[in-house]
Amino acid sequence: MTDQVLSISRSGGNPGRAFDESVNLANILGNHYNPALAQERIKECHNLLKKSVAKPSTEEMKNNGWDAAYDLRQWREFSDTENANVLTVVMQNVSRGWFGAGGGPTKASAEEANRFRKSIKNARSA
């Protein structure tokens, strides 16, 4: 039990990210079908994913049977955002897409505009 508390308390806030080779995980992994293999895999993953390890080469990835995962870098949600300015964004939002950055009249936007006008008329008469 002491080993378990020790391994969890060394984390800066996320117990799943802490790994210390000096901590004996035998008690924690006691119910695992293969505790020695589990401890070996935990160590292997930690060594592969720590910041000080260089990105694996294409050849190393191929030799290990690894594929590139989904790229988690930030992506542009809207392709024309570099051309947008405050005025066009405000115009687009105020006009419900009729004016400003992109958009334009469609059947759906015309119906929305009619609903919008009706709601304004109803609010005035109330």
Image (spheres, grey):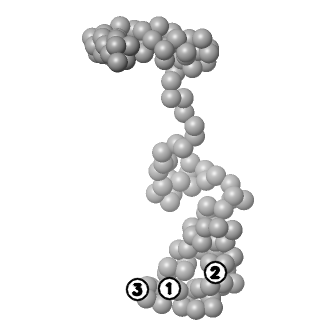
Please indicate, yes or no, whether residue 44 appears anywhere in the rendered image: no
In percent of width and height, residue 15 lies at: 60, 72
The quarter of the rendered structure image containing the N terminus is: bottom right
Residue carrying label 1: 29
Q: What is the three-letter code of the residue carrying label 1?
A: Leu
First-in-chain label (1 vs 2): 2
| Foreground pick, 6 / 114 | 114
In percent of width and height, residue 125 lies at: 34, 13
Q: Is mark 1 on a helix, strand or loop?
A: loop
Name the side, left or right, on which 29 lies relative to 44.
Answer: left
In percent of width and height, residue 60 lies at: 57, 55
The numbered disc on residue 90 is none
Name the side, left or right, on which 68 lies relative to 24.
Answer: left
Mark 1 crowdedness (10 Å alpha carbons): few <14, some 14-19, many ≥20: some
Residue carrying label 3: 33
Mark 3 crowdedness (10 Å alpha carbons): few <14, some 14-19, many ≥20: few
Q: What element carries label 3?
A: loop
Query: Can you tell which quarter of the image residue 3 is in?
Result: bottom right
Name the side, left or right, on which 111 lies relative to 89.
Answer: left
- Disc 3 and disc 2 in contact, CB within 8 angstroms: no
| Foreground pick, 48 / 26 | 26
Residue located at (54% from left, 91% from top): 27
- Given the current orientation, which residue lies at the most extreme right position? 52
Q: What element carries label 2?
A: helix
What's the distance in space between the residues labelled 1 and 3, CA to CA? 9 Å
Residue located at (63% from left, 91% from top): 2
Mark 2 crowdedness (10 Å alpha carbons): few <14, some 14-19, many ≥20: many
Residue carrying label 2: 7
Q: How many numbered badges does the structure rendering display?
A: 3
Whether 34 is drawn above or below 14: the answer is: below
